[in-house]
Image (cartoon, rainbow, N blue to C red):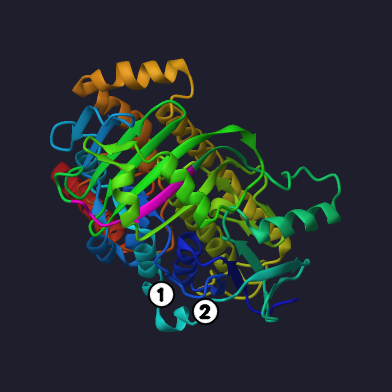
Amino acid sequence: MANGNFKVIVVGGGPVGLTMANALAKAGIDFVVLELRPAVAEDEGASLVLGPQSMRVLAQIGILDHLKSIGMEVIECRLNAASDGYMHKKLPARDVILTQTTYLISHGCAAYMFNRAHLVRALYDGLSESNKSRVLTNKKVTDVSADASGVSVLCGDGTKYDGSIVIGADGVHSMVRKRMRELALKASPEIDIDEEKPFVSEYKTAWCSFPLQGDEKGGPPGSVWWGHSKDHSVQYLLGNDRAWMFIYERLPAPTRESPRYTEADTVAFVEKWGDLFICDNMQVKDVFPQRYHGGMTILQEGVLKRWFWGRMVLVGDAAHKFTSNQGLGYNDGLDDTTILANQLYQVLHAPSQNDKTKRTESKGDPGLEVLSGAFERYQNARMKGAKENCALSATTTRLSAWRNSFYWLFDWWARPYFPYWLDVWMVNYMFSERIRNGPVLDFVESEEPFPTASVPWKYPIPNRILAAFCLITAVSLVISGRYRAY
């Protein structure tokens, strides 16, 4: 399996896998993406929400303007009773800065919602034509093998791909994670590694997309509704060209099983909840018959304790899975790809023992020990944030579905009456610090896309021109000060 040149095999061509591909392309690292589906951007799946920190990285990739043209700013949140539609609280951006205005002032950019297929297409189109040819569809991965010198990935059509490392961006049912665990246990039976079924589920969700119903049915595009009730809840998001509905239900008991639901299962579930209000004047049964697409899935939760072994490493839902109410899944997957790409760039461009000059391009394989160190640094950098966001997502899901009496009292009798300043404080406490800590590709130079942000970013975007200007300015001030002293 030895490889003279370093090559990455990315398994999974969804949003996280294609983000990884873009980052590798920017780093000048050879790669191939193996995607199960027959097309890169099939019009299926639900919505995705990106925070300012994610938009910032995608600006480095070069697709920010396109994303703004196909996405919709989140401008307003409304809380209602799922049982009768009664609206308990309206949070308009210009009055309570919970959404757009908070992000615009604090971070220079709003949160944006996207149709998943449109985002995937934008990520794919961000690649050059030569790099697009590296994204292969109809590639069902059936086996992954690895040794000290490289990896091999076998697909159901009989093709085999050899590389230096494999990145599992293949989601919650990850084949890469399964094979990684098997190989690790075979090599070291006493290794501390996650269970074969590492995630636990307490909730499931059905979703669908459908045409916008007009401003009188839930407000203008950019509005988000949260309908809460006992052991179930609903969400209603209005995008720029369609809307999405989610119905959440608590399971009878926690489970590690992961059933695959059919169309008939989805229809029966949604019909059971047809009388729920997704906003103050519209019910589930009013929009479900108009659906473009829909589906149902169990909501797995958890964060792996081991994200890598040997030459295999996991990103996104393969490594950590959140409930979807907060929309944090892709944002965390993007953080994974950013930090992993930074680590790979560093080890591939750092001076070797025999060559003390910095590498200007990726050359050869740095070896298993060096790669393991890079993977460990990646995991350590991401673990705290992943656990925090998993916990935040879990709390939001349970608060929305009134998991206990305290949640019900807080959500229904306390939070709707919070004063303006308390709403602002809560948002800043829960989100602002997370946003400002978002990583960037530290090898991609560009201008800061959101220079009006009032909250300083923890990680500045590399910009040698700006750095040189600041240095010249500082030196000039020092010299002029000395002359004045004389």
Contact? badges 2 and 1 (CB < 8 Å) = yes
Q: Quadrant of residue 82?
A: top left
For residue 301, side relative to residue 43 (left or right): right
Q: Quadrant of residue 468?
A: bottom left
> In the image shown, does 172 or 230 lie closer to the viewer?
230
Q: Is residue 421 above or below residue 477?
A: above
- Which residue is painted at 64% across and 66% down in the image? 166
Q: Within 10 Å of the Cα at label 2, are there few (<14), some (14-19), or many (20+) other Cα atoms? A: some
Residue 14: x and y in percent read 48, 63
Q: Amino acid at mark 2?
A: Arg
- Which residue is painted at 67% across and 61% down in the image? 175
Check disc 2 and report the residue beneath it.
134
Residue 207 is one of the magenta-drawn residues? yes
Task: Say which element carries label 1.
Answer: loop
Q: Amino acid at mark 1?
A: Leu
> In the image shown, does 118 or 96 lie closer to the viewer?
118
Residue 318 is one of the magenta-drawn residues? no
For residue 477, side relative to residue 46 (left or right): left
Residue 196: x and y in percent read 73, 48
- Which residue is painted at 37% across and 38% down in the image? 234
In the picture, which quadrant includes the C terminus?
top left
Task: Say which element carries label 2.
Answer: loop
Check disc 1 and report the residue beneath it.
127
Q: Is residue 51 above or below residue 278?
A: below
